[in-house]
């Protein structure tokens, strides 16, 4: 609860800080605010389940852990913005403010207890994203992406709202606990309105986490948005979105598991196939990461579909591993593509990494570790993420789904390793890339975390 | 024995990797080789100490837990090492042969620009391999399993300027991943069935199951799929010959002595489970035999010195799986050990030849090297005799034991095994004769340049030659007056398996005379094959036809000297050649069709699916609506 | 007694009467000199007829957004006043309820005010177009020389 209040106020503060002469205060201020929010997040730690705002928001250790992941990711991403120095038309104060506001939305959907809260949270998050996507005003693709995202997002929101309305019609309540007691009393005999409502609500949320066949916006939007905001979208929105889906299904709809699991399983398999297979064909690294984010949505959906006691840990660990690896991959991409842009042409393809290792061993290493983690190679955090997810699927007995997932992760090797091959084995002339000290620290820390959690995933357990 | 001592074994190579890997541009060349080799040797020394301590303490297996690693729900996986007969044997092979190859590489790779990188990767490989064999549960084993795959990938593509090499590396990695899929699923099924991945716990529970339990059959089949990937069995073997793109010490260490035997290690480790699943064992035996035959027949006609050895490795691995299939676990391990000696020797010898020939690998351009490279020649000869199975060299004992068990189990397997061993003897002697006998067929420059390799390379050759010659005496069968120390040493490993299936471990039913007969037949067969090779390649001095027809001189020689060969050719060589070519093309074609076909399928699908991303918002929304309608329709109306 | 719907009917009737009275009074009082411009529908100075697919000045949107914001505030203030101005609750809580409700609304209004201040300070409320600044670089080459060059080397393509 505290980070919500804090960031709402501090977001406004950041906006007004933008009127100061010196823009350089914005970045440290935003980072400081994020740290404050992280600290305030743990006030409620180990208090059990606490309800706030007239039972509209719930706080327990799980939601706090998700909040922490979101905040840590946000901290890393903000630290990599370098104050938007290189963009002429940038409005840094607004970007930072919007990022902070969007985090508020993320916290709401992580801990909602009331469907209206879910809706408000998703809207705060989405509207922020629409703006950030289009923030590169002089770039036509950025504008196109923002408009597309907005149109499709509005459509999905409509569907979701309809679902919420139907759920209210069926159960007479927006409250998750009330819905849960209604469903458990009625069992499979609940009315069709509830079924339709649940499906529509799920579809709306699956759109936000880009599950197939609602994934179409993802590649275009991720590709068009400025890379820094792509990073923001692919980590924070995904983490929060999965927390929300998991909360909905595990909290209210376990009694009718037999109803929804088949649909979700079909969507999972489709997402895995679409994400991984199309990624093979991409030549743009950024676009590949967009498809990779679809495929990771698929792996996370496996955990949600299986809904076993392990699931919450699996989702938590997977989101963390995925977020860190994605941030460092995008971090390297931003440095490299900026260097290329300075030399005259914007290049976000695999070929941009050619010969990276020769003069920038650190960047190449960071890239390699993040790719290995995304591919799920052992001794990286990504491996354990997949391990836990698959483990929860086995517990539910969804072995066939596992076969698809493991096969698709073999396909994943192909496109993730292309980046490593380009960086280490291809000839190329990049030249030395200068990295700001803070940027370097973030990259090193992210890589270290990936390896640390890969060597000893138990540490994460201990932290909780 | 103390935990800190055990930790040193994998830790030393890891430290070596870190030193060489982080500072490979700053550390002087001389120091790189010494650091890398010392890391391996130190690890070997510690392993020896551990082995001594183990024997002194009464040979009781023990699990040394280092720390709690993962605990998810009810599943808890400790990070611990298991020290027993099996892991100790593997430790000795990995660190022992590994150290020799490190020393050898210090000479072999001296002039390469990536010297430091090479040693770093080699040490990293050693680290993962040690994790693989020391881990006390399937998850640690899997970590090592994937790690060695990664290192193998890095080392095959070591000379990364060449696109073909990179492709070979990627092929190896992806094929291995397909195998890993099976292994991973197997592990998950084990978790699901036994609720643990610790070897001791799983096997303790497994002894309570009946023979032929379907779950165990599924588990073992899945594990075996993993083994076929790593140990290059049908249908996942084609990566291994391609993997010869890597530097020769890598081929010796990874693709002959250690990594490829990981599959066999895994099966022996899980012997309780496999003993419970006779159906799987049948599959293992059949696949092993088929691989042994197919690879040996392909080896008959290869002209690249390393390719011959690669197919020979595949074939020998097939023998080991044959042994596993007939539940001769000790025999299989025996062959792993002897094979590690003589195949590492052969590869290193081949490396020495290639070194002398300035990179030439085609045996058609060699010949007569025995005078210029005496040490290499003698050691290579010993290796060849050992692999051909001629007593009293190491290969004889282990191969004969496998064949005897096969005979006991099923006569057909024995006949096929014998056939394979004849082919092995033939192609190995062919390789030997073409390389070291006759007259030199290379260019003048090469002839001028010929030289024996430096001491750092010949020393490992000599050591390995000694082991190849004498290594067999650790397992002299009873019938020849020995006690088979190896089998005795390993027998506690099968406690659980013996409990569930006592019949499988009963003493041999073969009479002594039968055993003598079997040995006699296989020795005579090997000798005859060797003789045939001698006649063809030394007496008649024939050389395999060049690939292009633009060398009329060579061809004319063959043409004029041997009209009789025409007949010979038509009766023996041609059918065999046709068969071999057929098998080669069929095998390669069919298997590549399946494996590459999957890759192509993914690519084609990707190309098609990519078109769904049209960029038009209207279309996207239409697709979403179709999705929504389908979901609602199916859920609300059809169910 | 009137029912609730009756009151609404009264409202409707009163509205119609009011409009008729106002329009009728103005008709009687104003001078009547129509021309074409005056007879068109009033749309804040925009051409009322034509293709709908034209580009509006983007400032309209900003103003409209700010307008909507305060419209929403207004709409929100009304139910707030009705629901929270509960005499019973205020009396029961010794007046604290009233202060609480007021504080909540002040926070809401305060935030909107901050937003307005932000928009104001950013200049979003100013209608005047900013003057574009053409960068001036002192160059030894007179502009006429460039013209000449362009003329000389201009591709001689006939425009059909």
Image: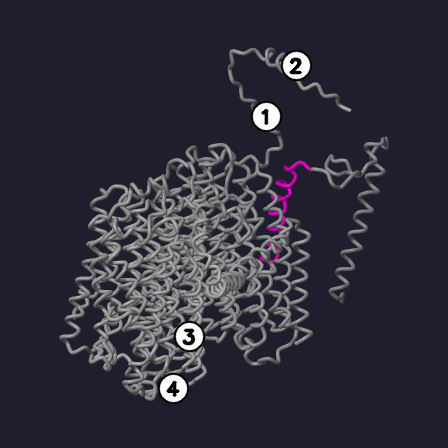
Q: Is any atom of residue B119 visible in this view?
A: yes
Marks 2 and 4, how far apart at CA: 96 Å
Task: Give the structural element (helix, strand or loop) at label 4.
Answer: loop
* Disc 1: which residue: C131
* Disc 4: which residue: B209
Residue B126 location in percent, x, y? Answer: 28, 59
Give A54 or B552, whichever is nearer the viewer.
B552
Q: Residues within 10 Å of mark 4 (few under 14, many from 20)?
A: some
Marks 2,4: beta carbons within 8 A: no
Q: Tell which circle, 1 or 2, labels the residue nearer the N-terminal end.
A: 1
Marks 1,2: beta carbons within 8 A: no
Please tell me whether residue A22 is drawn above or below residue A227 in the rendered image: above
Marks 4 and 3, how far apart at CA: 34 Å
Q: Nearer the viewer, mark 2 or mark 4?
A: 4
Q: Residues within 10 Å of mark 3 (few under 14, many from 20)?
A: some
Task: Give the structural element (helix, strand or loop) at label 2.
Answer: helix
Residue B278 location in percent, x, y? Answer: 41, 82
Q: Quadrant of residue B145?
A: bottom left
The residue shown at (63%, 12%) is C148
Q: Nearer the viewer, mark 4 or mark 3?
A: 3
* Disc 3: which residue: B416
Kindly identify which numbered label has been placed on residue C151.
2
**Stretch of the chain drawn in magenta:** C56-81
Marks 1 and 3, how far apart at CA: 92 Å
């Amino acid at each position: 609860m505290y980070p919500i209040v804090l960031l709402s106020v501090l977001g406004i503060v950041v906006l007004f800080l933008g009127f100061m002469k010196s823009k350089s205060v914005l970045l440290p201020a935003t980072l400081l605010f994020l740290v404050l929010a992280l600290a305030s997040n743990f006030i409620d730690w180990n208090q059990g389940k606490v309800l706030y705002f007239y039972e509209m928001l719930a706080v327990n250790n799980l939601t706090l852990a998700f909040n922490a992941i979101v905040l840590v990711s946000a901290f890393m991403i903000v630290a990599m913005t370098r104050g938007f120095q290189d963009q002429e038309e940038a409005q840094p104060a607004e970007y930072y403010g919007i990022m902070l506001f969007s985090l508020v939305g993320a916290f709401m959907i992580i801990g909602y207890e009331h469907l209206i809260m879910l809706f408000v949270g998703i809207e705060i998050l989405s509207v922020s994203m629409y703006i950030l996507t289009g923030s590169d005003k002089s770039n036509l693709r950025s504008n196109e992406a923002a408009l597309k995202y907005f149109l499709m997002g509005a459509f999905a929101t409509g569907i979701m709202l309809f679902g919420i309305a139907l759920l209210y019609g069926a159960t007479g309540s927006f409250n998750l606990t009330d819905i849960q007691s209604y469903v458990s009393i009625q069992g499979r005999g609940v009315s069709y309105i509830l079924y339709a409502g649940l499906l529509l609500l799920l579809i709306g949320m699956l759109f936000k986490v880009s599950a197939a066949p609602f994934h179409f916006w993802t590649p275009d939007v991720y590709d068009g948005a400025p890379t820094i905001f792509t990073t923001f979208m692919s980590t924070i929105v995904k983490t929060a979105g999965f927390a929300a889906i998991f909360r909905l299904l595990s909290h209210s709809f376990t009694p009718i598991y037999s109803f929804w699991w088949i649909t979700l399983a079909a969507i999972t398999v489709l997402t895995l196939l679409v994400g991984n297979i199309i990624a093979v064909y991409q030549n743009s690294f950024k676009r590949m990461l967009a498809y990779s984010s679809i495929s990771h949505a698929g792996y996370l959906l496996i955990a949600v579909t299986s809904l076993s006691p392990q699931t919450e840990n699996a989702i938590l660990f997977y989101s963390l591993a995925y977020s860190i690896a994605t941030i460092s991959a995008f971090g390297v991409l931003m440095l490299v593509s900026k260097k290329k842009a300075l030399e005259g042409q914007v290049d976000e393809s695999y070929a941009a990494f050619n010969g990276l290792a020769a003069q920038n061993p650190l960047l190449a290493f960071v890239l390699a570790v993040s790719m290995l983690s995304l591919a799920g190679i052992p001794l990286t955090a990504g491996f354990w993420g997949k391990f836990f997810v698959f483990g929860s699927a086995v517990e539910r007995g969804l072995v066939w789904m596992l076969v698809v997932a493991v096969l698709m992760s073999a396909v994943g090797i192909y496109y993730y390793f292309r980046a490593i091959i380009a960086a280490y084995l291809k000839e190329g002339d990049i030249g030395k890339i200068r990295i700001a000290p803070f940027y370097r620290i973030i990259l090193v820390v992210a890589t270290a975390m990936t390896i640390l959690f890969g060597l000893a995933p138990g540490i994460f357990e201990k932290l909780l | 024995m103390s935990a800190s001592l055990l930790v040193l074994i994998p830790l030393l190579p890891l430290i070596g990797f870190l030193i060489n890997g982080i500072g490979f541009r700053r550390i002087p060349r001389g120091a790189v080789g010494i650091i890398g080799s010392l890391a391996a040797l130190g690890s070997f020394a510690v392993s020896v100490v551990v082995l001594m301590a183990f024997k002194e303490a009464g040979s009781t297996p023990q699990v040394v837990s280092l720390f709690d690693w993962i605990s998810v729900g009810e599943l808890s996986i400790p990070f611990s090492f298991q020290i027993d007969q099996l892991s100790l044997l593997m430790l000795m092979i990995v660190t022992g042969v590994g150290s020799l190859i490190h020393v050898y590489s210090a000479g072999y790779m001296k002039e390469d620009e990536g010297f430091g990188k090479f040693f770093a990767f080699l040490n990293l490989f050693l680290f993962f391999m040690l994790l693989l064999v020391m881990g006390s549960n399937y998850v640690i084993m899997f970590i090592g399993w994937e790690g060695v795959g990664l290192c193998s990938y890095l080392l095959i593509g070591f000379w990364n300027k060449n696109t073909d090499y990179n492709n070979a590396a990627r092929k190896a990695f992806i094929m291995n991943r397909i195998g890993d899929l099976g292994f991973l699923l197997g592990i998950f099924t084990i978790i699901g069935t036994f609720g643990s991945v610790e070897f001791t716990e799983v096997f303790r529970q497994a002894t309570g199951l009946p023979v032929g339990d379907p779950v165990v059959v599924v588990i073992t089949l899945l594990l075996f799929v993993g083994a076929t990937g790593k140990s290059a069995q049908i249908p996942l073997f084609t990566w291994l010959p391609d993997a010869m793109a890597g530097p020769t010490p890598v081929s010796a260490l990874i693709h002959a002595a250690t990594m490829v035997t990981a599959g066999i290690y895994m099966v022996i480790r899980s012997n309780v489970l496999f003993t419970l699943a006779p159906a799987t064992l049948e599959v293992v035996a059949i696949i092993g035999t088929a691989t042994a035959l197919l690879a040996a027949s392909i080896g008959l006609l290869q002209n690249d010195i390393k390719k011959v050895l690669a197919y020979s490795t595949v074939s020998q691995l097939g023998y080991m799986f044959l042994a596993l299939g007939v539940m001769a676990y000790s025999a299989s391990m025996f062959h792993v050990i002897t094979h590690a000696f003589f195949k590492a020797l052969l590869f290193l010898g081949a490396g020495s030849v290639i070194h002398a020939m300035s990179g030439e690998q085609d045996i058609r351009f060699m010949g007569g090297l025995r005078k210029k490279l005496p040490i290499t020649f003698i050691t290579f000869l010993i290796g060849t005799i050992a692999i051909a199975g001629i007593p009293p060299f190491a290969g004889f004992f282990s191969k004969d034991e496998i064949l005897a068990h096969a005979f006991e189990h099923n006569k057909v397997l024995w006949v096929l095994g014998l056939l394979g061993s004849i082919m092995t003897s033939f192609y190995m002697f062919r390789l030997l004769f073409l390389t070291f006998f006759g007259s030199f067929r290379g260019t003048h420059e090469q002839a001028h340049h010929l030289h024996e390799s430096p001491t750092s390379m010949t020393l490992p050759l000599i050591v390995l030659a000694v082991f190849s010659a004498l290594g067999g005496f650790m397992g002299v069968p009873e019938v020849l007056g020995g006690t088979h120390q190896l089998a005795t040493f390993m027998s506690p490993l099968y406690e659980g398996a013996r409990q569930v299936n006592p019949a499988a471990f009963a003493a041999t039913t073969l009479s002594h005379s039968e055993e003598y007969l079997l040995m006699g037949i296989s020795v005579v067969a090997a000798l005859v094959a060797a003789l045939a090779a001698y006649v063809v390649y030394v007496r008649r001095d024939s050389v395999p036809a060049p690939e292009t027809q633009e060398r009329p001189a060579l061809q004319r020689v063959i043409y004029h000297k041997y009209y009789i060969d025409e007949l010979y050719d038509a009766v023996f060589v041609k059918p065999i050649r046709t068969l071999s070519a057929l098998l080669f093309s069929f095998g390669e074609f069919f298997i590549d069709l399946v494996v590459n076909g999957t890759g192509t399928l993914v690519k084609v699908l990707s190309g098609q699916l990519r078109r769904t991303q049209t960029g038009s918002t209207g279309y996207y929304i239409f697709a979403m609506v179709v999705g929504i309608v389908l979901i609602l329709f199916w859920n609300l109306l059809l169910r | 007694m009137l029912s609730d719907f009756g009151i609404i009917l009264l409202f409707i009737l009163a509205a119609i009467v009011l409009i008729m009275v106002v329009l009728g009074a103005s008709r009687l009082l104003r001078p009547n000199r129509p021309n074409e411009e005056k007879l068109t529908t009033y749309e804040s100075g925009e051409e009322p007829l034509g293709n709908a697919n034209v580009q509006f000045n983007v400032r309209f949107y900003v103003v409209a957004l700010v307008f909507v914001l305060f419209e929403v505030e207004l709409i929100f203030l009304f139910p707030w006043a009705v629901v929270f101005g509960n005499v019973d609750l205020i009396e029961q809580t010794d007046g604290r309820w009233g202060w609480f409700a007021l504080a909540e609304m002040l926070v809401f209004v305060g935030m909107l005010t901050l937003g307005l201040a932000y928009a104001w300070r950013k200049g979003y409320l100013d209608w005047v177009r900013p003057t574009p600044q053409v960068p001036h670089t002192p160059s030894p080459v007179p502009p006429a020389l460039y013209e000449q060059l362009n003329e000389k080397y201009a591709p001689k393509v006939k425009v059909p």
